[in-house]
Structure formats: structure tokens, C-alpha cells
Amino acid sequence: MSFGIYNQVIAEAVVLLVLCVAAAVLLRGRVQWSWLIGAVAFFGVTKLVLFLGVAGDIYPDILGGRYNWEGKIAAVATTLAVAALIFRGKWAEWGFTWKQNGPAVGLGYVVTVVFILANAAFVYWYWPGVKVEPVIDMAYQMTMPSLDEELVYRGVLLLMLDRAFKPQIHILGAPFGFGALISVALFYVTHALRVDADWGVVFIAFEILPLIYAVFWTYIRAATGSLLLPVLMHSWANAAGYWI
């Protein structure tokens, strides 16, 4: 199936909107609608900027390789620009900080170590043998997916959703609300969903690794108050096969 750039963006934005509306119904409308609408708009824009890099003739192919370097870089720049505009330089509010000042930092570290070991064991037994790719492709896998996706799913989008849906509970000392649940579900769906140019849809429901990863990384983000460890863990998950 040929990848449908605009159809994919629309489909993923609709998924987010449906998840948000479902949460709003459960909360009986006790929602900050401006943040909800802003979250959907932000997500759609960043996805469009990202997928335009797949077209091959929108951005100049400067770095080469077989991955979407230019689209990812443009998406990261867009996310940072939107965050600077909306949150007015309060970077730490959405996790863009080195400091680990969250409500459950110690448990965040423990979960991080558990994830490192569990992912290493999974890669070793499920995908035996060291993966080999050109250096430029290895560099991409170790940097761009983690930067782009963590800044969005566990960063700006998560904060916007948390502001839209105020009620929340705490899990192992870290705040979890509808915003976190939507972010986790969206990360899974967008990695399993493919829409072509003719609106043909493929959904690989059994591809649950993104769901598992999202649970880990969302908890670590909430526990530590920073995107640093989620970014590093995302890079580790993508690149572990090069070393194990």
C-alpha cells in the first residue's frame, strides 16, 4: 500500500479527537475545551510537518540514508516553536529540563533500570544477532525518533492534555490522568495504524511493543518531571539491537 501522507495525518488526528471526546464524556464535560482543541491541532500540525518529509520532494535530502531525517528535524523544530509560543519559555512545565524534580524520582530511576534490563533481554532472545545498518541510519535510530516522539507524546501534548483533563490519580507516586492514558493509547495506535492514499486502512493490533514502551516512558516522565530519561530509554529501545 502506498503511504497517504494527508490521509494518515487526518486519521491520527481523528483518533486523538475520539479519545479526547470519550474522556470528556466520562468526565461529564468537565474539560478545558480550549486545551483539548489546541492539543488536537498541535498534534495534527506536527504530524503533517513530519510526514511531508516522506514525500521526498518537500524538504531537501541533505543527510541521506533511508530514513526521514528532514521530516523529523522539521517536526522537532515545530514542536519547540509551538512550546515556546504557548508556554512562554516555561520549558520545565512540559519536561524540557535536565533536572529530575518530579514527585517520585527514586521510583522513576528504578523503573528505568527495569526497562533497560527487560528490553535488553527481549532483544537478545527475540531478535538474536547484532543488527547492521549504515552509520547514517544507525545515527537516525539513536536520535531522531526519540527526540521527536518524546517531545510530543510525553512532552507538549501530554501537558496540553493534562490541562484539558484536570482530575487525576497517582500511580507509584506519579500523577496519572486521562491525559497520560490518552497519550499512551495514541502512541500505540499511531504506531500500529497505516492509511494509504486511497483510504485503505491497516491496523496491526498485535504490535503491542509501542503500548508497553509508552507505559514505561510515560511513568518515568511523570515520576521524574523530565523528558531526559524517556528520550534516552526510547533511544535505547531503538538501538539496542545494534549492540546485543
Image: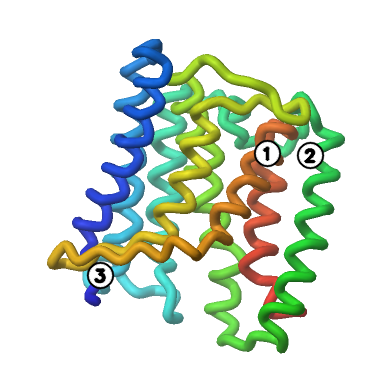
Return the mark for residue 74.
none
Residue 121 sits in quarter: bottom right
Element type at marker 3? loop
Residue positioned 32% across, 28% down in the render: 21
Is 97 situated left or right of 148 in this image?
right
Residue positioned 56% across, 25% down in the render: 177
Element type at marker 1? helix
Quarter occupied by the N terminus: bottom left
Quarter occupied by the C terminus: bottom right
What separation in Å lies between label 2 and label 1 (alpha carbons)? Answer: 7 Å
Rendered location of residue 30, percent (x, y): 39, 11
Is 241 situated left or right of 75 in this image?
right
Rendered location of residue 8, percent (x, y): 26, 57
> What residue sits right under mark 1 in the picture?
219
Query: Measured along the vertical axis of the image, is residue 130 above or below residue 184?
Result: below
> What residue sits right under mark 2 in the picture?
108
**Depth check, front residue: 97 or 9:** 9
**Depth check, front residue: 89 or 207:** 207
* CB-based contact (under 8 Å), mark 2 and mark 1: yes
The type of residue carrying mark 2 is Gly
Query: Measured along the vertical axis of the image, is residue 144 above or below residue 123?
Result: above
The type of residue carrying mark 1 is Tyr
Return the mark for residue 3.
3
Residue positioned 41% across, 20% down in the render: 26
Element type at marker 2? helix
The type of residue carrying mark 3 is Phe
Residue 66 sits in quarter: bottom left
What separation in Å lies between label 3 and label 2 (alpha carbons)? Answer: 37 Å
Residue positioned 74% across, 34% down in the render: 224
